[in-house]
Amino acid sequence: MLRVFTLPNSSYITGDVKYYRWWLTSSRMPIEQVMREYPVPVVWGMKVLAWASDSAQESYFIPLFAATMITVDAVMTMSLWHSGHRVGTVWWILFVMAMGPLMWFRFDMVPAVCIGLAVLWFHRHPGACGVAVAVGAAIKLWPALLILPMIGRSRLAVRRLVTFAVTGGGLALASLLLTGWTRTVSPLSWQSDRGLQVEAVPATIPMIRHALSHGAQYLVGMSPFNAYEISGPGVDTWVAVSSVLMMIAVAAAAMVGWLTWRRGGLGHRQAILAATVIIGALIVSNKTLSPQYFVWWGAPVAVMLDRLPGESDRPGRAPARLGPLTLMIAGALFVTAVLTQCIYPLSYGQIISPVPTSWGILLLTTRNAMSILTLGLCVWALVVSLRTGDGHPRSSSAISPLVKLRRVAETR
């Protein structure tokens, strides 16, 4: 990762971190006007880093930011290992390396690890699970949808929901009181006003046409939203398609929540699979897609790779059927991560140039196709898990004696 970072075409990876620092130190604006595209808790965290690194020194802020992300990554790695997820730990280390040094200079590692810890603590620490989801939502908003597969009527599910509501509500109230309503909801309006980003899955066809027309019909440039967007014939149609797909994704998340409540709750693996489906649907349908988004997907997949507490050992049940599917999901997402690093930063100039190269567009098209394939595998695995019914939550007080009696009988 360090070697990739030192390459000439990786020099702009730190651009976002410099952007954060500029807003915090050079803009001289009140917090109500600072980094309006991000939730207010993000600004609070950045201010702490700016204070700790001496805001006047850019050379201190960037390394401290990178060290913070590496530390968050290490928390996820050690938590997986400590919980007995050996395969997941190794896969997570390799996955982050496949994503590349970009992971050091984007704070998306924070909500990703929050979601990873949430699904890791699903049963063992339900209160902390709800807090982790709420913190992730305070950083990136979308993780709030991931509480839907975690609701239910059991005592553990209620604890998850209560801690999520208390933590999330407290952060939202603090943001509202300190910055006002307009600043609190500004990330939502910022997102809705954006155009079609070049890496988004719905932008694949316009980008292919852009390459075939040799730059004669389409224009790619930096927008006021600090992202490279494409404009030209048919782009508005694809923006509309993206909006429809996003509504479908949110509706699907709501349906998962309804199904979860109707069943009284989901099993551990079912909840993780539902989370991967929701995350994948949000990534694939979005009109904006930045390469660091894929780390969101990786954290729950790392937890899912190992056996989870309470799963049946009987042959033919869900874990046996889901084993190959889980490996396929992990493999497809890993390939997606490798392609993502090949795109950004290694070949990004070939994609955003006035006349994009065939190689750059091929990488982009293949990566987006792999994203769709990964989502399809996640949906397939969730359907298999729900149909088999394995892992369906039951009262721990009712399960434990039965398990003990069965083991005693088998021993005798």
Image (cartoon, rainbow, N blue to C red):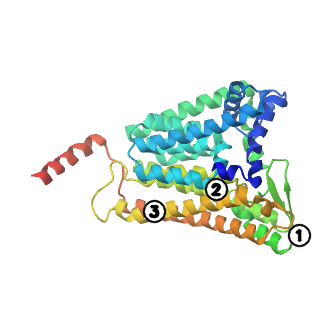
N-terminal of the pair, mark 1 or mark 2, is 1
Q: Measuring from the top left, give residue 1's x and y in whole percent.
A: 63, 50
Q: CA distance from mark 1 to mark 2?
A: 27 Å
Q: Is residue 70 above or below residue 332?
A: above
Q: CA distance from mark 1 to mark 3?
A: 42 Å
Task: Sort mark 1 into few (<14), some (14-19) or many (20+) by Cα contacts within 10 Å.
Answer: some
Q: Measuring from the top left, give residue 295's x and y in whole percent.
A: 59, 50
* Residue to which mark 1 is pinned: 217
Identify which amino acid the numbered label 3 is placed on.
Answer: Leu
Question: Front-most of 379 and 65?
Answer: 65
Identify which amino acid the numbered label 1 is placed on.
Answer: Gln
Please identify the quarter of the rendering in which residue 237 is found: bottom right
Q: In the image, 142: left or right of 226?
A: left
Question: Front-most of 187 and 71?
Answer: 71
* Residue to which mark 2 is pinned: 283
Which mark lies nearer to you, 1 or 3?
3
Identify which amino acid the numbered label 2 is placed on.
Answer: Ile
Q: Measuring from the top left, give residue 51's x and y in whole percent.
A: 71, 24
Q: In the image, 366: left or right of 332?
A: right
Q: Which mark is residue 187?
A: none
Residue at horizontal 43 percent and vertical 51 percent from the top = 262
* Residue to which mark 3 is pinned: 327
Identify the element where label 3 is drawn: helix
